[in-house]
Image (tube, helix red, strand yellow):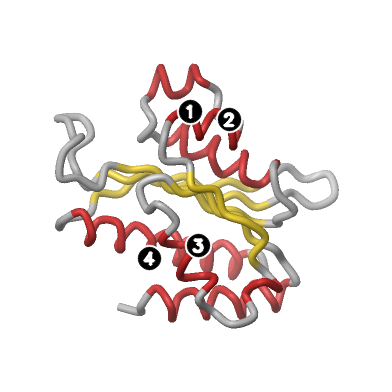
């Protein structure tokens, strides 16, 4: 499995080939993805900004996630992940964004959303009169808190690469 740095380097090459900018919206990964991206020399050419929105208030304030979505679906949900990705696009100069929200553990899980549940969204700004392209997914990862967070970060980066490669 490629490391976060290897994935970030691959992402940087893909972003530069497109001439695109990236924005990230992270909750359970707490900035881990932005850290791996900015560890790549020259990432300032393609990484616009990252939002670490760990609390519900931060999701609402920084990314304009509607409070009702959190109340209805919970912070760890596909609707909230989608709103986070769209908020990151709207509040940046990015062409593409990725969002992650989940339960890394060891506590916080439930029968419906056990520890290791992570929701993702990837959004690409529309071109001309096309709407934004959005991909949403929920995954469950095994392991301790660190392992869940690392797997989530890796999955988000891989999803960004897939979305970019599909746009060619």
Residue at image coords 39%, 31%: 75
The residue lying toward the viewer, choosing from 49 and 16, is: 49
Q: Dividing the image into 4 quarters, which one contains the C terminus? A: bottom right
Q: Residues within 10 Å of mark 1 (few under 14, many from 20)?
A: few
Instruction: Give yes or no for contact between labels 4 and 1 (Cβ–Cβ under 8 Å).
Output: no
* Residue 52 position within the rendered picture, expressed as x and y whole percent measured from the top left: 49, 47
Determine which of the numbered discs, if any, sits on residue 57 in the image.
1
* Dot 1: element: helix
* Dot 4: element: helix
Q: Between marks 4 and 1, how big is the CA–CA gap? A: 26 Å
Above/below status of 24 relative to 64 = below
Q: Between marks 3 and 4, how big is the CA–CA gap? A: 12 Å
* Dot 3: element: helix
The residue lying toward the viewer, choosing from 49 and 122, is: 49
Q: Between marks 3 and 2, how big is the CA–CA gap? A: 20 Å
Instruction: Give yes or no for contact between labels 3 and 2 (Cβ–Cβ under 8 Å).
Output: no
Q: Between marks 4 and 2, how big is the CA–CA gap? A: 27 Å
Residue at the spot of label 3: 34
Instruction: Give yes or no for contact between labels 1 and 2 (Cβ–Cβ under 8 Å).
Output: yes
* Residue 93 position within the rendered picture, expressed as x and y whole percent measured from the top left: 75, 53
Determine which of the numbered discs, if any, sits on residue 154 in the image.
4
Q: Earlier in the sequence, mark 3 or mark 4?
A: 3
**Side of 54 relative to 149 (left or right):** right
Residue at the spot of label 2: 61
Q: Between marks 3 and 1, how big is the CA–CA gap? A: 20 Å
Q: Residues within 10 Å of mark 3 (few under 14, many from 20)?
A: many
Q: Earlier in the sequence, mark 4 or mark 1?
A: 1
Instruction: Give yes or no for contact between labels 3 and 1 (Cβ–Cβ under 8 Å).
Output: no
Residue at image coords 63%, 56%: 49
Above/below status of 160 relative to 64 = below
Q: Which residue lies most toward the right here? A: 128
């Amino acid at each position: 499995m490629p490391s976060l740095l290897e994935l970030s380097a691959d992402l940087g090459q893909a972003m530069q080939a497109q001439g695109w900018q990236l924005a990230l919206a992270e909750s359970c990964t707490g900035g881990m993805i932005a850290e791996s991206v900015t560890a790549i020399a020259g990432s300032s050419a393609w990484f616009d900004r990252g939002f670490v929105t760990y609390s519900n208030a931060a999701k609402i304030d920084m990314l304009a996630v509607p409070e009702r979505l959190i109340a209805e679906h919970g912070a760890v949900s596909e609707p909230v992940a989608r709103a986070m990705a769209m908020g990151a696009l709207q509040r940046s100069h990015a062409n593409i964004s990725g969002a992650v929200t989940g339960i890394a553990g060891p506590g916080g899980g439930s029968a419906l959303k056990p520890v290791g549940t992570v929701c993702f969204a990837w959004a690409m700004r529309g071109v001309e009169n096309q709407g934004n392209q959005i991909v949403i997914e929920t995954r469950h990862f095994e392991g301790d808190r660190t392992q869940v967070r690392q797997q989530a970060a890796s999955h988000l980066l891989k999803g960004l690469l897939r979305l970019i490669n599909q746009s060619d």
